Image (cartoon, grey):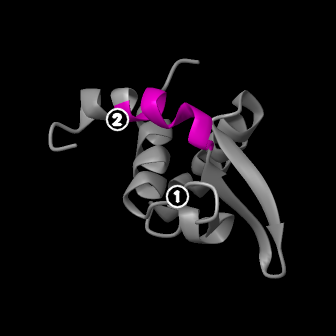
Amino acid sequence: MEFGKIHIDILYKLWRNKCFGKGHMLIDNVLRGFPKDKKDKFGEAVDGLIKTGYLIQKTTKHGYAVYIDPKLRVEIRKILEKHYDFL
């Protein structure tokens, strides 16, 4: 999959909040903090990451939540290190 700036921003937000497996974040909270005029693009990016398997969707009593697939943690870290030198 080709990662754009939007995909990297979403993965980094989940990474810094330690959303692996048991730790998860509601999709509404993932989209919070990004520009409101681009919310549709960020929502489509989350859907794309779910379809490709980088994010796993989970049903909670508050709605749908996502987390990073723990099996792909090393691969995602390498991707994020290319864009963020401090990781």
Pointer 1 local density, CA inside 10 Å: few below 14, some 14–19, many at least 20: few
Q: Which mark is residue 81?
A: none
Quarter location, residue 70 = top right
In reply to whether residue 71 is colored magenta, the answer given is yes
Q: Amino acid at mark 2?
A: Leu
Quarter location, residue 44 = top right
Residue lying at 53% horizontally and 59% vertically, measured from the top left: 19
Of the image marks 1 and 2, the number of the one nearer the N terminus: 1
Q: Spatial distance from mark 1 to mark 2, Cα to Cα?
A: 25 Å
Q: Which one is in front, 58 or 37?
A: 58
- Asked if 71 appears above or below 13 in the picture, the reply is above
In reply to whether residue 29 is colored magenta, the answer given is no
**Residue 3 appears at what percent x and percent y?**
49, 26
Q: Determine the secondary structure under disc 1.
A: helix
**Residue 12 appears at what percent x and percent y?**
40, 48
- Asked if 61 appears above or below 10 in the picture, the reply is below
Extreme residue in the left direction = 86
**Residue 32 appears at what percent x and percent y?**
51, 69
Q: Which residue is mark 1?
A: 37
Quarter location, residue 31 = bottom right
Residue lying at 56% horizontally and 63% vertically, measured from the top left: 30
Is the C terminus in the top left, top right, bottom left or bottom right quadrant?
Answer: top left
Q: Main secondary structure of the magenta part?
A: helix
Q: Which residue is mark 2?
A: 80
- Using residue 41 as the reference point, say whether residue 51 is left or right of it: right
Residues rendered magenta in the picture: 69-77
- Asked if 85 appears above or below 79 in the picture, the reply is below
Q: Determine the secondary structure under disc 2.
A: helix
